[in-house]
Image (cartoon, helix red, strand yellow):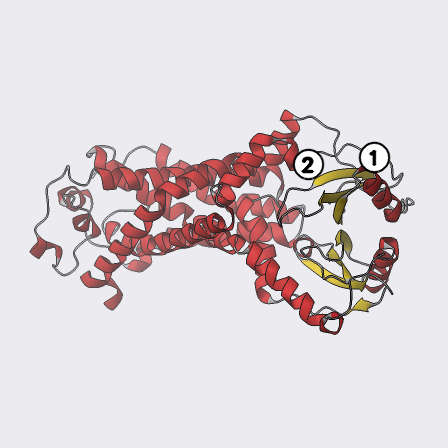
Amino acid sequence: MATTSPRFLRIAYLVHKWSSLVSTFFLLILCVTGLPLIFHEEIEQYLSPHPAAQSPAAGAPLASVDAMVARARAARPGEQLVSVAFPQGQAAVVVDSVPDGAPPGASPHRQAFDLHSGEPTKLLLPDDIPVMTLLLDLHKSLFAGLPGTLFVGAMGLLLAVAVISGCIVYAPFMRKLPFGAVRRDRTRRIKWLDLHNLLGIASGAWVLTVGVTGFVNSLHDPIADQVRVGFMALTASYRNAPPPEHPGSIDAAIAQVRRAAPDMALVSVWFPGTRFSTPHHYAVFTRGNTPITSRMLSAALIDAEDGRMIPVPDNPWYTNALFVSQPLHFGDYGGLPLKILWAALDVITIFVLGSGLYLWLGRSRGGRVPGAERRQAGAAALRDLDMSTAATRAWNTGPRSLRAIFHVPAWLALASAAGLASALLGDGAWDALSWGMLGIPVLAVAWALWRPPARG
């Protein structure tokens, strides 16, 4: 087969080696910082205990948002109001403001109010836990702002390239080995090679998903800017009009959106002239009420003077891709069991990265294989890694077909895909299905590591 020619395998090996080497250091940082971020809600609760979030009571009267905004403005005179947010699952309203003349992206001051009484209330926000904010900034941008975020996204793409090329290189390694083989009675280097192959192929579908979604998430700011450009295009007729001196009622804007989309839940309202609005409109964002649509935002533009609603088209595909990528990257959509599995797969990925680095750093310890022998038909990837193939020849008899080599890995990939998707489709049984399916690769690794060693 052309795809198993020595030249193709050599190219795949070089792609796998260099995509891994360039990205490994940064990926280790992302994996290590991502581990506590998986449990950020539990860590925040432990470090700063607070009452459990109370969902808004059905049918209970709601306080005037205009009144809460007035109180927030009076408490922070001289600041510009940015947005009003409605945290999911909490009976609260959060009003953000920044000092006049603050640069774009400046951290806002946040005031929380009870959704029903309108009185100030305590609400735990991510900024309350400095260590978690520090870890998030390091994970998101390496403390380098938007350039750092885009660089992190590029590392996610390199991770995806390394996974795909690694799957190609996996085949010649396993021509004479069954799935999960770890030759504990061989040299330390061969044992680490087997562990690298086992952990990498078992977690490959999950790692590929996290890498691709990490890249998509890194495009959040450019996509958000593109959304605002779209808003400006929709309101081109306002281009020469002066901004409203006294914007109208937010309660009226919210009421109009509720009438147009009664099944949607409020997410936020952005004031005219802020990042996600236009100089003349409130931007009201809502979300759906199913597990997957609750991740996707819809926007409405309300004229801040006369209250007219400007029709906004459905989200473009790349915006929806961003919304879906967020839960698929952090694993925060299927309860604590899914977070535990996410953490287990994160730890497995750390071992894959570490073992790959170990194999590369120790590449000069073994003897070199002559170049002519490397080019022989059917040359195994072990030769490309400058390892002796004698142990492989003695391990088993007869090469296996590609179908036999990838039979178990393909089923593990399908189980991972089902686990990643099912919790987005619903709660309850769908969450349980997600836990079971995503647990299969973890159990496969545990089975291979703790079963009695085979003898070759």
- Can residue 138 be seen here? The reply is yes
Viewer-proximal residue among 180 and 301:
301
Which quarter of the rendered picture does the N terminus lie within? bottom left
Rendering coords of residue 17 (x, y %)? 27, 50
Q: Residue at 66% of width from left, 53% of height from top? A: 295
Q: Residues within 10 Å of mark 2 (few under 14, many from 20)?
A: few
Whichever of labels 2 and 1 marks the residue nearer the N terminus, that label is 1
Circles 2 and 1, Cβ within 8 Å, touching? The answer is no
Image height check: is 190 above or below 322? above
Q: How many marks?
A: 2
Which quarter of the rendered picture does the C terminus lie within? top left
Q: In terms of image quadrants, where is residue 63?
A: top right
Which residue is the extreme one toward the right? 61
Viewer-proximal residue among 82 and 294:
82
Q: Residues within 10 Å of mark 1 (few under 14, many from 20)?
A: some
Rendering coords of residue 239 (x, y %)? 72, 70
Give the amino acid at mark 1: Pro
Q: Residue at 19% of width from left, 34% of height from top? A: 187
User: What residue is shown with label 2?
Assistant: 125
Give the amino acid at mark 2: Leu
Image height check: is 139 above or below 14? above
Rendering coords of residue 229 (x, y %)? 63, 66
At mark 2, the secondary structure is loop
User: What residue is shown with label 1?
Assistant: 120
- In this rendering, would 88 be left or right of 209? right
Q: Residue at 39% of width from left, 43% of height from top? A: 26
Rendering coords of residue 78 (x, y %)? 77, 43
Q: In terms of image quadrants, where is residue 161?
A: bottom left
At mark 1, the secondary structure is loop
- In this rendering, would 241 be left or right of 108? right
Instruction: For marks 2 and 1, give the CA distance.
Output: 15 Å
Q: Residue at 86% of width from left, 47% of height from top? A: 65
